[in-house]
């Protein structure tokens, strides 16, 4: 389902997400409104506990909204069943995490191909595309290396290649440079910006607490007390 002409890729209206911590009700998102178009790199910043990670989880259909609406690429995420949400995550969303989340016993190309395996395709069939993506992120010479033979920056590049294997509409990065030195982090941010700008219908959303990382993005969303400030 592509974008309706002029419709934003992401639109949240009055988005609320509540959850229980013990007997306390926490309102992590409190009537948040947001519109984002494809072809851009957006950073989400704000103090700890402001709702940044919750927003990322709702965007990736890992969390369902309590109320309000959120549509991503024309899909109303609040209306999805568990099975539909899982399908949406598998085919429309790429995830990049601070700690890379690579499988230590698999080579770089196998890690990249893993989402295809989880989608009932054979690793062997997915290999050409996995290798192509590793070349795209500058790791053509490392396709058979395991994570233990790679640097932190290289592992994050493998993770970015993996996030692209299903050709997602939205790529969500949670503190992707949090474990990297500044030079390596800058190269990873440059790569994320390229990934966003390569496709008019792809959006990269990054949560970061690093103002230098946020400054690289095309647009910065400040979340405070569960709302866009």
Image (cartoon, helix red, strand yellow):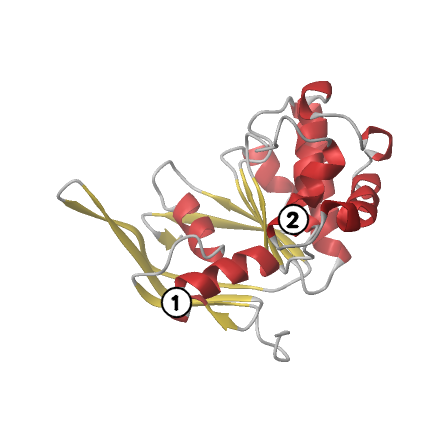
Q: Which residue is mark 1?
A: 78
Q: Position of residue 33 (x, y in %)?
A: 41, 63
Which residue sits furthest left?
A: 23
Residue pictured at 84% horizontal, 40% vertical: 135
Which residue sits furthest right?
A: 141
**Quarter holding the N terminus?**
bottom right
Q: Is residue 2 left or right of residue 126?
A: left
How far apart are labels 2 and 1 at the CA level?
28 Å
- Between residues 18 and 63, which one lies in front from this camera angle? 63
- Between residues 137 and 132, which one lies in front from this camera angle? 132
Looking at the image, tell me whether mark 2 or mark 1 is earlier in sequence order: 1
Q: Quadrant of residue 199?
A: bottom right
Q: Position of residue 56 (x, y in %)?
A: 47, 50
- Between residues 83 and 187, which one lies in front from this camera angle? 83
Q: Position of residue 12 (x, y in %)?
A: 43, 65
CB atoms at circles 2 and 1 under 8 Å apart?
A: no
Q: Which residue is mark 2?
A: 117
Few, some or many C-alpha atoms within 10 Å of disc 1 (few <14, some 14-19, many ≥20)? some
Circle number at residue 34: none
């Amino acid at each position: 389902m592509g974008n309706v002409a002029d419709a934003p890729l992401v639109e949240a209206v009055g988005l609320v997400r509540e959850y229980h911590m013990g007997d306390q009700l926490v309102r992590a998102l409190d009537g948040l409104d947001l519109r984002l178009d494809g072809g851009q790199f957006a950073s989400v910043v704000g103090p700890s506990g402001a709702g940044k990670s919750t927003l990322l989880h709702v965007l990736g259909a890992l969390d369902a909204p309590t109320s309000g609406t959120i549509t991503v690429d024309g899909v109303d995420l609040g209306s999805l069943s568990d099975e539909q949400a899982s399908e949406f995550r598998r085919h429309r969303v790429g995830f990049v995490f601070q700690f890379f989340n690579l499988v230590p016993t698999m080579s770089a190309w196998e890690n990249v191909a893993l989402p295809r395996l989880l989608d009932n395709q054979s690793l062997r069939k997915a290999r050409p595309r996995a290798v192509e993506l590793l070349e795209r992120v500058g790791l053509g010479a490392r396709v058979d290396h395991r994570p233990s033979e790679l640097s932190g920056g290289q592992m994050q590049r493998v993770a970015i290649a993996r996030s692209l294997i299903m050709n997602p509409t939205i790529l969500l990065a949670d503190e992707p440079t949090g474990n990297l030195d500044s030079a390596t982090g800058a190269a990873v941010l440059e790569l994320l910006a390229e990934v966003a700008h390569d496709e008019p219908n792809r959006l990269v959303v990054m949560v970061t607490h690093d103002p230098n990382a946020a400054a690289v993005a095309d647009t910065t969303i400040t979340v405070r007390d569960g709302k866009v400030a």
